[in-house]
């Protein structure tokens, strides 16, 4: 009987030890998941065309490394950059040169251009200057420079390569060109050409630059939802997205033409609304579809589920990115109205005569906008006309609300 008691006691003790060990490992795992790891961010920075001559461009960017951890130092042992030029003409004879110069607060740059490993201390920052020189016989066909800044973060999560993507516009259409208005039953519409919009722009300034010189009282300006999102910096390269269990499995159930039909496209949605909401929307949406009510997934998963554009979904170089829907669209149109006096709307229009209004200023008629934009005057290709100026002809829209 004594042996039984001893064996039982040993069993209970061993079981308790296993449980405690499991709880300890679970605690470590939970703490690990909450830790920021190599939380070092490189900002898009400020970029300027210091020299803008027909045969010589000098583009200078000032970027900043920010250590967003609370107790950890992160190292930057390596950084280099490359550039891709987008042009309406061949690039024969066009050359580029990139130079990276650190502007550390506590250490001078080396005269030989070598990047020495630098420690960004807790809560601190350091700056880096990137200079892109472009030379050629005639650079006027150039549209933009796609700069990729590759850097290594070295810290508690190991050695992690990261990339900051920056698109810098190089060609700016004139507002003096004769406007080409197009008639519709209730309004004339004018697709407005702009430079290649980037995160360096903001919607209000773009409207001031390209629309105000052509507008008159009572006009309405509409902006495409994708260009607004791009100006807000809401685009991600697939290499920066790590598809998880939910994204890898659920993406197979969507139509091949859907932006959620790839693991990275679906993960972009998961990162916004969370895996639980996506799974619940998928299950309930599948049930609703069986009952003859399709489209429920997009209603349950949220507005972003419809607005995400996967790779190839927009014009170069953004065809290489996943572009999310715009953030706070109502705030954007209200600010345009406040600063320009123009009624404004952010819209999602396609060649299938589908017009979706994400946000509009007070007093705008939804049916009026839909009729004016029905034939998609902005286009779905590379027209580069993200703005449409609408001028009412037969009806007065002021004060009308659907």
Image (cartoon, grey):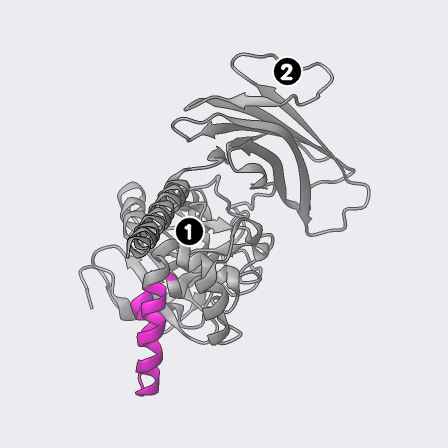
In depth, the one of 248 and 105 nearer the eye is 248
**Mark toward the start of the polypeptide (2 vs 1):** 2
Figure label count: 2
Whether residue 302 appears in this view of the structure is: no
Position of residue 38 relative to residue 340, above or below, is: above
Element marked by disc 2: loop
Q: Nearer the viewer, residue 62 or 5?
A: 5
**What span is colored magenta in the figure?**
277-304
State the mark number for residue 211. none
Please tell me whether mark 1 sits on a helix, a strand or a loop.
helix
Q: Residues within 10 Å of mark 2 (few under 14, many from 20)?
A: some
Q: Residue at x 25, y 65 (%)?
A: 365
Is residue 221 in the magenta section? Answer: no
x and y percentages locating residue 224 in the rendered image: 42, 58
Which secondary structure class fits the magenta region best?
A: helix
Most distant residue in the front direction? 1
Q: Which mark is residue 109?
A: 2
Q: Position of residue 51 (x, y in %)?
A: 64, 28
> Within the magenta stretch, is there residue 285?
yes
Residue matched to label 1 = 228
User: Residue 47: x percent and y percent?
Assistant: 54, 32
In screen coordinates, is 113 left or right of 5?
right
Percent x, y for residue 156?
51, 34
Q: Gap between marks 2 and 1, in whole Å?
A: 38 Å
* The N terminus, quarter of image: bottom left
Q: Quadrant of the C terminus?
A: bottom left
- Nearest the viewer among 375 and 395 is 375
Point 42% across, 67% down: residue: 349
Q: Quadrant of residue 145?
A: top right
Please tell me which residue is depicted at 30% across the width and 41% down the height of the picture. Answer: 339
- Badge 1 crowding class, 10 Å Cα cut-off, few under 14, some 14 to 19, many 20 or more, is many
The residue closer to the viewer here, 109 or 190, is 109
């Amino acid at each position: 009987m004594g042996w039984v008691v001893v064996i039982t006691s040993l069993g209970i003790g061993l079981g308790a030890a296993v449980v405690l060990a499991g709880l300890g490992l679970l605690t470590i795992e939970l703490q690990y998941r909450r830790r920021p790891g190599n939380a070092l961010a490189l900002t898009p920075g400020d970029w300027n065309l210091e020299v803008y001559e027909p045969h010589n461009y000098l583009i200078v960017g000032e970027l900043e490394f920010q250590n967003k951890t609370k107790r950890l130092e992160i190292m930057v042992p390596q950084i280099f950059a490359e550039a891709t030029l987008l042009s309406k003409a061949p690039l024969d004879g066009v050359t580029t040169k990139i130079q990276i110069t650190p502007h550390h607060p506590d250490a001078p740059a080396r005269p030989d251009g070598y990047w020495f490993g630098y420690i960004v201390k807790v809560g601190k920052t350091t700056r880096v200057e990137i200079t892109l020189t472009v030379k050629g016989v005639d650079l006027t066909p150039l549209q933009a420079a796609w700069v990729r800044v590759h850097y290594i973060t070295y810290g508690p999560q190991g050695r992690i390569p990261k990339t900051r993507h920056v698109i810098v516009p190089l060609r700016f259409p004139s507002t003096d060109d004769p406007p080409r208005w197009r008639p519709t039953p209730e309004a004339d519409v004018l697709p407005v050409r702009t430079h290649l919009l980037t995160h360096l722009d903001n919607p209000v300034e773009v409207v001031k630059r390209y629309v105000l010189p052509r507008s008159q009282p009572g006009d309405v300006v509409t902006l495409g939802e994708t260009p607004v999102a791009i100006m807000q910096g809401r685009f991600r390269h697939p290499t920066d997205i790590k598809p998880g269990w939910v994204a890898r499995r659920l993406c197979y159930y969507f139509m091949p033409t859907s932006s959620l039909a790839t693991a990275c496209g679906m993960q972009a949605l998961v990162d916004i609304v969370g895996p639980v909401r996506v799974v619940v929307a998928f299950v309930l949406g599948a049930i609703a579809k069986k009952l003859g009510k399709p489209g429920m997934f997009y209603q349950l998963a949220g507005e972003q589920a419809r607005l995400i554009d996967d790779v190839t979904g927009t014009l170069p170089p953004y065809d290489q990115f996943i572009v999310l829907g715009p953030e706070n669209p109502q705030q954007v149109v209200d600010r345009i109205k406040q600063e320009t006096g123009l009624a404004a709307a952010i819209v999602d229009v396609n060649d299938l005569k589908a017009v979706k209004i994400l946000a509009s200023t007070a007093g705008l008629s939804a049916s009026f906008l839909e009729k004016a934009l029905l034939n998609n005057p902005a286009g779905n290709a590379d027209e580069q006309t993200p703005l449409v100026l609408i001028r009412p002809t037969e009806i007065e829209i002021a004060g009308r609300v659907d």
